Each structure stands twice: as structure tokens, then as C-alpha cells.
Image (cartoon, helix red, strand yellow):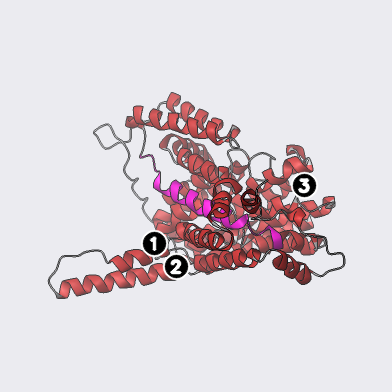
Amino acid sequence: MTDGVAAIAELPRSLADYPDLVGAGLTQTWLARMALEPFNGIATAIFLLAIVHTFAASRVTAAAHRLQDGHDAANRRQGRSPSPSVMAELLHLLGEVEVVFGLWALVLLGAMALYAGWDTARHYVNDGVTYTEPLFVVVVMTLAATRPIVSLAESCLRRLADIGKGTPAAWWITILMIGPLLGSFITEPGAMTICALLLARQFFDLQPAARLKYATLGLLFVNVSIGGTLTHFAAPPVLMVARPWGWDTAFMLGHFGWRAAAGIAASTMVYYLCFRGEFARLATLPPVADEERPDDGTGAPLPVPAWITLVHLGFMVWTVVNAHYPALFLGGFLFFLGFARATAAYQGRVELKTPLLVGFFLAGLVIHGGLQGWWIAPLLASLSEVPLFLGATVLTGFNDNALITYLATRVPNLADELKIAVLQGAVLGGGLTVIANAPNPAGQALLSRFFDDSVSPVGLFLGALGPTLIAGVAFRLF
């Protein structure tokens, strides 16, 4: 191996390259690892700055709006026609949550190139990071948002909502109880997309109070995160551990699934009782007219033939079954785009902008996350059962939960009760922030238009805190 190839292979260092410091404390271990590889500290500092930027994105967006308003006012005073402000547009770009980690990935790339050379930086971004999950999310979000799939989900859930007379509360409870469980079968991004689109149509369009909006968004994120634990093949944090630890669907149902379902039901009903007055007000409002769809010239939406819905379901199944093989699910997606074009009379618009932004967000996150194992792995290894459960919950708020469970598989001789605790914590914390679980950016992107400027991280955290605590009780005390 040449010196150049050896240098390329050094970042990130394998966890096995770090010496095992017997008897050393956690701080000593971290300091020793930074001394051995100084770039660890640089990469983590850039990652922390990206997290701070994420939490400040709503303020940046608000500043962009104020700057644009001032620019418009100046144009009116001078008798000029309205025009976009370049500075306002740049601030708006910096305030887009979906682009934050991508922007800081450029900073990371530059720092790595200065530290170890361009070849090392290029090798890490191109060969050292796996982009299968971001690519999969782009495809499954696009498929799940198509009119035939959403119409099918809506018609199925309508039968349950009709038991409650089809009120906004009945739709809200049905979507938030049943929809997240689909994540165990059609994957969490698919479930998130369907739930978010139906909530937008049946609930958010009615303009509920701000507190209920944030409570709903937080509840949705938590329910989707824990709702993917009924099986061993759909949720990313579960996929990371199922094969290394030998867990199958029966194990997941017995140790996680029924507890997750109980937590989802309890959290949803508690929030319903807390906001029942607001739901009663929403029930008095007239339904909001459906938005643009293809029609037959009379204004009525064209009914989707059953065979088109079946073909869409076939594309969904193909994508889920081949979720680990980008060449297959991307090839299938190209065929889908052709099919959607050929059957455009029965389709809505194939939305690509939002899925692409979400995929960009996740790609940036995995670039940063791949360099954080040096401090997360020893932290997980140092904790006993309850602290590990709590630690995984907190860490998930600042990292994608699949990264937490993946690093847990690298901890040698982890006891069975500790394995259960770390997965419980990882999925439990998946609703606390937008970066905690891969589907969260999809839900936020689809629902952010209902929030002033953008979604507040504090509002999201407070909205998710109650369901997180309730689900934690379901996981640990039953």
C-alpha cells in the first residue's frame, strides 16, 4: 500500500485502531482518541455547529422575511416594481433546515482537505459514506405521495374515521394511531409521508391553534419512530441491529411492538383529551375544498382505476423489498416516472422537490455522522442499563437514531438487556428533533407551510416531550 492510499484510508479511523485504555474514564478515553487523531475534534466541532444552525434556522428565516419586507418597502417608496432581495434570498437559503447539513458538509470537506489532502476528503465523501438511505427516502417519499397511494390510504382510514362521524378529531386519532404502525411494513419514510399528507388535508388545513399544531407534529414524529418496531425489516434503527443480534419479527413484537402500539394509543388519547376543546371548535368549521387534481372537465377528480393503484403498490413493494440495493430501486423508480407520465390523467403532480431536499438533508447528516463514532461508541460502552436507555434517548436527539444503534453493534459483549435498552432509547428519542429520525425531515417539509416562518425546534421538542415520556413508561415499566 502506498503512502497516498494509506492516508486516504485513515479518515475516519476504524474504532478498532484505538487502544483499549483499561481503567480509563470516559473523558480520558476521548482525550486519548483526539490525541491520536486530532481531526476527531475538528469534525465534531463542525457537526455541533451544524446542529446549532439547525436549531437557529427558524430565526434565520424570520430575518430573511424582515429583510425582504424592508426591500419591498424601499421599492414602493421609490416607485419601483417589487423585486427579490439577493441578501434575503441568501438568508432564506441559510434558514432552510433541509440544506443545513449539506452546507456544513462543504465546510467539513474543506477542513478535511486542508488537514489530510483532497484525495482523503474525496475518498471519504465518495467511498466512505453510504447514501443508500437518503436515496431510498427520496424514492419512497415520491411514491408514497402519489395520488393513487394517498387515495388508497385515505379510503382505508376513512372507514375508521367514520366510526367517529368523520370529525377532525376522528381523522386525527385515526391517522396518528394507525398510520405510524405502517412504518413496520412500508418503512417509516413511507408512513411519515402518508400520515403528513393526510393530516395536512384532514386537519392542518382547518388552521388549528399553534399549540395543537406543535403537539400534533411532535406526536407524529414520536409515533412514527416507535411505530416501526413491530417488524425487523423496515425501520432503519432496527435494521442496523436485527442481523448482528439475531432479532426476528417475533422477537420485535414480543419485546418492542406491543409496547410501542400501547404507547402510541396512550399518547394519542392523552393529547386528544388535552385539546378536546380545540377539536370541538374545529368540528364546527366547514371542510376545506380539495386542492388541484386532474379532472374530467367538470371539476370533479377523475377516479383512479384499481389497476393503476395496484401498479403503484407494486412499485412500493419493489422499492421496500430492494431497499438495500440502490441500482434496483432507482431503476424501478425510473420505470415508475414513465408510468406516471403515461397515466397522467389519473395522477396528481409527481412531487420531487420536497423528497430531493429531504434526501439532501439526510446525505449531509450521514456525512457528518460517519465521523462521530470515536466519541459515541465509548460513551455507549460505559453505561449500564438505565443510563444507556436514557443516554441513547438523548443522543438520538443530536444524531440519527440509526447511527446510535449501528454503533451499539460495535460494542463487544453487550448484554441482551443492554441491547434492548439501547434500541428502546434510540427509537424513543426519535421525535425530539428533526434530525433524530430519518423520516422527520420528510414530515417537517410536508407540514412546515402550516407554521409561521418555519417549525420552531423548541416547539417541536415540547410537542414531542409528552409522547416520549408516555412511550418511555410503556417500554420500561411493562
Label 1 neighbour load within 10 Å: few <14, some 14-19, many 20+: some
Front position in the image: 201 or 449:
449
Secondary structure of the residue carrying tag 2 is helix
Residue situated furthest front in the rendering? 2
Q: Is residue 473 left or right of residue 294?
A: right
Front position in the image: 118 or 132:
118
Separation of residues labelled 3 and 2 (CA atoms): 38 Å
Instruction: Write down the region rendered in magenta.
Output: 349-375
Pointer 1 residue: 93
Residue 247 drawn above or below residue 398: above
Name the amino acid, label 3. Answer: His
Q: Is residue 343 left or right of residue 41?
A: left
The quarter of the picture where residue 79 lies is bottom left
Front position in the image: 150 or 278:
150
- Per the image, is 60 magenta? no
Name the amino acid, label 1. Answer: Leu
Front position in the image: 448 or 20:
20
Secondary structure of the residue carrying tag 1 is helix
Name the amino acid, label 2. Answer: Ser
- Residue shown at 76%/61% (left/top)? 378
